[in-house]
Image (tube, rainbow, N blue to C red):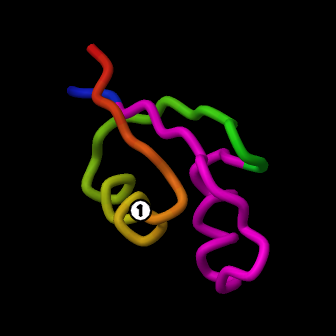
């Protein structure tokens, strides 16, 4: 299964609470934090929710 490298690129200041909670669920706490997760439908949905705050790369 593919893996996703998720990097938080923007601050959560001024964002909705559910966006902050989603970033915490992904394992991101501050700008430039990186998390590597399996590319499941759940993770892709979470990334879609906060797509304006993160960048995503596929990792082999």
Residue 19 among those drawn in magenta? yes
Marker count (numbered): 1
Q: Is residue 50 left or right of residue 31?
A: left
Residue 24 among those drawn in magenta? yes
Q: Position of residue 9 (x, y in %)?
A: 59, 48
Q: Position of residue 58 (x, y in %)?
A: 28, 28
State the SS at label 1: loop
Q: Quadrant of residue 53?
A: bottom right
How crowded is the residue under tag 1: few (<14 C-alpha within 10 Å), some, or many (20+)?
some
* Residue in front for this viewpoint, 19 or 38: 19
Residue 8, relative to residue 36: is it above or below?
Answer: below
Q: Position of residue 34 (x, y in %)?
A: 61, 32
Residue 11, relative to residue 37: is it above or below?
Answer: below
- Residue lying farthest left? 1
- The residue under the point 77% across, 48% down is 30
Q: Position of residue 1 (x, y in %)?
A: 21, 27
**Boundaries of the magenta span:** 4-28
Q: Quadrant of residue 44?
A: bottom left
Q: Is residue 28 left or right of residue 9?
A: right
Residue 54, relative to residue 52: is it above or below?
Answer: above
Which quarter of the image is occupied by the C terminus? top left
Residue 36, relative to residue 20: is it above or below?
Answer: above
Label 1 sits on residue: 51
- Residue lying farthest top? 60
- The residue under the point 72% across, 60% down is 11
């Amino acid at each position: 299964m593919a893996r996703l490298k998720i990097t938080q690129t923007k601050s959560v200041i001024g964002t909705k609470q559910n966006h902050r909670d989603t970033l915490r669920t992904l394992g991101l706490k501050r700008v430039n934090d990186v998390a590597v997760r399996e590319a499941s439908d759940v993770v892709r949905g979470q990334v879609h929710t906060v797509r304006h705050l993160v960048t995503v790369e596929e990792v082999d």
